Amino acid sequence: MAVTTTDSTSFPYIFIKNEEIPLKTFEKGVLRANVYLPKDAVPHGSQRYPVIATYGPYGKDVPYSSFYKNSWDQLNPDMKSDHSAWETPDPGFWTRQGYIVLRVDERGAGQSPGELDTMSRGTSEAFFDVIEWAAEQPWSTGKVGLLGISYYAGTQWRVAARRPKGLAAIIPWEGMSDYYRDRVRHGGILSDKFIDFWWKNGVAPNQYGKPGRAARKWGEDTIEGDLDEKALERNRSDQTADTATHKFRDEEYYRTREFAIEDIEVPLLSVANWGGILLHLRGNVVGWMRAKSQHKFLHFIVGRHDLPFYYAHSSDGWKSGQQPRVKLTVREGDCGVDDPERELGFPSRSEVDWPLPNTRYTRFHLSANNTLTTDETTAEDGVKAYDALNSEPIQWTYRATERLEIIGHIVASGKAPSDVDLFVTLRKLDSDGKEIHFTGTMGDPVPIVKGWQRASLRKVDSASPLHREWLPYRNYYATDGEPLEPGVVYPIEVEIWPTNVVLKPGETLVFEVAGHDTQGVYHRERHDRWPISFTPRSLHYSQPAAQLVAAPTGCP
């Protein structure tokens, strides 16, 4: 049955719908894609163009306005077209710039048959075939670039490590690079609420064979017809269930999702959002650090997760001149929450590397009077008792007497006498003691940054070539679990995600520790955080330097 159609008259670009791409390298079968060509592209004209490709499960035919109408209503009009789709390059805009847009339904999603297994080895294997196919098409120059947000960024890291022929560059825009550490298990703790929301709202409704898609305005019904619920269940790996079942990184489930970031050699622009403190921020930074690309760039932005990608200045790139290797948005002052115009008021700065070469690490010690001090001689030993599941967080504060910039990676060290999940947050208060929030992923108010760690998974592999004093490396293997014997106090290091904030004189830094989430994407799966395992706990801090925050400070 012929399913591919071409419309060369209805739009300002040529629209090829349901182009079939054969799987051949790792699997057999077919993927279906939409291709958007400039009007003079071969065979309709004589021109060949570079290709921008995406591969994911949200649906090549699901209108942006259906997927997230509130976001669509606020989108830059210049990047809106009849075929705009969530978190992907807009065909109308990019074909005007001289590119072909290739949007592919992931295997098992939309119109692509097969088993749906998101962020799996199969994801990168199929994307590999997509890129090599695109490079060989008569309308292509042979160069394929990858550009997209979130999931459409996460797939870029994975396939780039496979080095498909024709891949010319990648731009992972706010996209995790480490499935276990960035997305699924923060510090070993299951991030269940996000995964559940993401799966039920973004992925499951678009499974291949799902009945009623057209009636729900969620793309079109499956070409080959609907599947019943039993067939749908057989044809998918439910990420919600899989991540709850599999706890350790050396399990087959996670091993099949691993890849060597160091194998990435193509030019790379990684775009990290300071406000993405619950999912993507770490992956953009660590992915950039580990990639071996000769030409690689790291840009830090602020704002929501969805809109900045579509800002006019975001697409300028090198048209505005040579770009710095590292470009920072510096979070100094208060520019409000979800206010794009005010956020433009944050200053920017160019740097030569990350972490910044001139970083000075300052140790902030915790004291019994709930203050942070840089003077080790005035710090005291202490114990703070709290209800791990229900109590208010414990906070320590530091009031700045001069301008202080914190930028880079942070480690918090403490001691615990039993297994506990530590949830660490850094906050900023203005000179009147009111918290200054920043824009989070969904336009929500968020603190400076967060970090997590399960005490029984505290083991650090200091022999790993990836280990740094400011970025402790953990394997999270089943054999790494270290139970805590009652009555014994154990040292724990908490990795806090990379961050930036400036304190002016009179402003306050808050270091907060809790045994549960205080906001945002929750970690509450009842088997992972069984209440009997997290009864009231105590946090120990002692001197000379056991309980401290090692913060990167002192940059210009």
Image (cartoon, grey):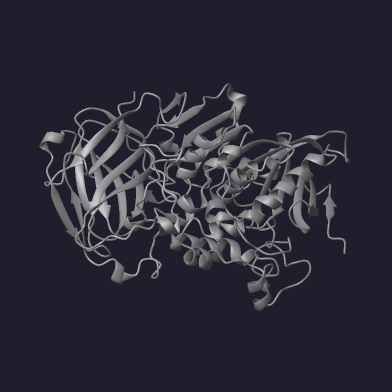
**Quadrant of image for the N terminus:** bottom right
- Residue 20's spot in the image, x, y percent? 80, 54
Residue for point 71% across, 41% down: 164
Q: Residue at x 41, y 37 (%)?
A: 342
| Image quarter hosting the C terminus | top left
Near-viewer residue (20 or 246): 246
Question: Which quadrant holds residue 169?
Answer: top right
Query: Looking at the image, which residue is at 11% across and 43% down?
Result: 380
Judge whether 392 appears above or below 437 on screen: below
Pick out the residue farthest to the top.
Answer: 321
**Percent from the top left, x then y, of residue 173?**
55, 42
Residue 37 showing in the rendered view: no
| Front-lying residue, 81 or 268 | 268
Query: Is residue 364 in view?
Result: yes
Name the one closer to the observer, 304 or 287.
Answer: 287
Question: From the viewer's perspective, is residue 139 above or below residue 124?
Answer: above
Give the answer, above or below, for where 478 lies relative to 76.
below
Where is residue 460 shown, x and y percent of the image? 37, 47
Picture coordinates of residue 149 (x, y %)? 57, 46
